[in-house]
Amino acid sequence: MKIVFALVVLINGLPKNTDGMYFADADRCNQLAYETETGYAGAGPDGSTKAWKSSGYTIKAYCEPRLVEKSARQF
C-alpha cells in the first residue's frame, strides 16, 4: 500500500467521478484543485492570466490523502 493524494471535485455540491486521479505530490494535487476551482486556463501570449467561469455552477475542488495499492497509477 502507498499514500497518494486524490483530487475531489464538487459541482453544485455534488461529487463528480475523479476516481483514479491520484497524485504522489500534495503540491501538484493542490495546484490542480486551485486551477479547477478558479477556472485558471494558463497565461496568454502577452503574459496575462486567462481564466474561465462556468455560468450557473459552483465548482469546489480539494485533495485528500488516500491509501491505495502500490500498483495504482498516479500523475
Image (tube, rainbow, N blue to C red):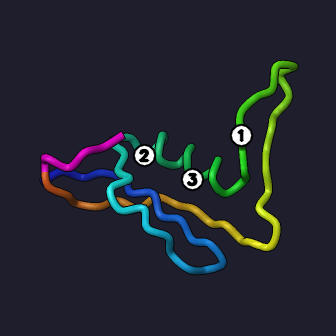
Query: At numbered mark 1, what does the secondary structure look like: helix, strand or loop?
Result: strand
Query: At numbered mark 2, what does the secondary structure look like: helix, strand or loop?
Result: helix
Instruction: Say which label, 3 or 2, has the lower sequence index.
Output: 2
Distance, label 2 to label 1, CA atoms, is: 20 Å
Q: Which residue is mark 1?
A: 41
> Quick one: 62 or 12, which is closer to the camera?
12
Residue 15: image x %, image y %? 50, 75
Which kind of residue does numbered mark 3 sit on? Ala
Q: Is residue 41 covered in magenta?
A: no
Which kind of residue does numbered mark 2 sit on? Ala
- The residue at 36%/40% (across/down) is 75
Instruction: Say which label, 3 or 1, has the lower sequence index.
Output: 3
Which kind of residue does numbered mark 1 sit on? Ala
Q: Which residue is mark 3?
A: 33
Q: Which residues are magenta?
A: 70-75
Instruction: Say which label, 2 or 1, has the lower sequence index.
Output: 2
Q: Which residue is mark 2?
A: 26
Residue 16: image x %, image y %? 50, 70
Q: Farthest residue to the bottom: give it.
A: 13
Distance, label 3 to label 2, CA atoms, is: 10 Å
- Residue 18 vertical placement versus 29 (above, below): below
Task: Count the marks.
Answer: 3
Crowd class of label 3 (few under 14; some 14 to 19; many from 20; radius 10 Å): many
- The residue at 55%/46% (across/down) is 32
Crowd class of label 2 (few under 14; some 14 to 19; many from 20; radius 10 Å): some
- Residue 33 vertical placement versus 57 (above, below): above
Of discs 3 and 1, which sits in the foreground? 1
Image quarter of the N terminus:
bottom left
Lateral position of residue 71 relative to residue 43, left or right: left
Residue 58: image x %, image y %? 72, 71
- The residue at 53%/61% (across/down) is 62
Quadrant of res 48: top right
